Amino acid sequence: MSTERSQKLKMVLEAVPAGHLVDAGWLTSHGIAYETFRDYVKRGWLERLTRGVFRRPAPHAASLNTVDWKTCLLSMQHIMRYDIHVGGTTALTQQGYDHYLRLGSNAPVWVYGDAIPNWLHRLSLNAPVETRSTSLFADPSLGLITDDLDAVNTLPWNWKLKMSSPERAVMEAMDELPGQEGFHNLDMVFESLTTLRPRTLAALLHSCKKIKVKRLFFVFADRHDHPWRKHLDPDEFNLGSGDRALIKGGKIHPRYRIMVPEEFVITEENDGP
């Protein structure tokens, strides 16, 4: 092997911790030619997981086709520098609000980004992945919990997932109602969201581009009436006009004019205006 190729291989091995992933785009951007990929795989320095995606083998570990979803996303964020984040119910689960969420192998991992590589869906991960753009908010970076991705010499066990804060995550989850998420599960989660930050919520509500999400947020907020609710005035946010039919067989909420399960309206009516 030439000195130049040896130096490039050394760079790969130093930048990619054992068990972590890189793709062809990252390799070529670091001066490694396509024809070299096959040589690295043949020599056992990389494992090919799917077309254009490789893993650095872990010492003394059996080669497994299934990849841990956290390892995959950490590799995308910290090595390949894809601008993605974990959001929705996945972010709520990662921050401890998982008592009533659907767990286990069938629980999807919600990944948000505007340039998510196609190969993510081809990988055999240990959980299904649902991808979404960041179009829900005018400011796509608002309400994200970010690690210092520019830190140098950080070790992989110190890496943290970039994800939505609880304030943003619950709005992302509401955007999936009623198709991908259930009212009952989110209602139980919302009951535990006692310490949300009013300023962050206000900023997100102003930035949110979907009337449906903003109306639903206040339906849940009024229903649970956490201490932070008194700091938010619905009249300060653009909630649109006219009725919104969200589900079949529900009932129009008397204040927020969106179709919700009947028990949400009954609670509101019993509580008074």
Image (tube, rainbow, N blue to C red):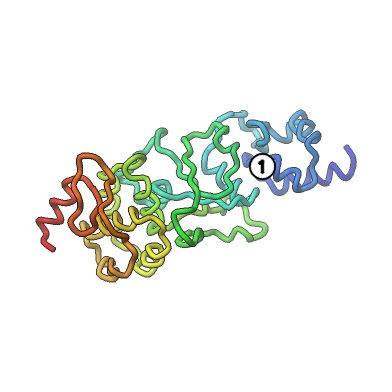
Circle 1 is placed at which residue position?
Answer: 22
Q: Nearer the viewer, residue 41 or 19?
A: 41
Residue sitting at 68 percent across and 35 percent down? 52
Residue 126 position in % (x across, y down):
49, 34
Residue 199 position in % (x across, y down):
37, 70
Q: Nearer the viewer, residue 142 or 41?
A: 142
Residue 189 position in % (x across, y down):
29, 50
Amino acid of disc 1: Val
Q: How many discs appear?
A: 1
Q: Is 138 located above or below residue 2 in the figure?
A: below
Viewport quadrant of the C terminus: bottom left
Q: Nearer the viewer, residue 162 or 20?
A: 162
Residue sitting at 57 percent across and 45 percent down? 116
Viewport quadrant of the N terminus: top right
Residue sitting at 39 percent across and 57 percent down? 166
Q: Residue furthest front?
A: 242
Indicate left or right for 267 with 182 as reference.
left
Secondary structure under badge 1? strand
Residue 144 position in % (x across, y down):
48, 59
Residue 184 occupies quadrant: top left
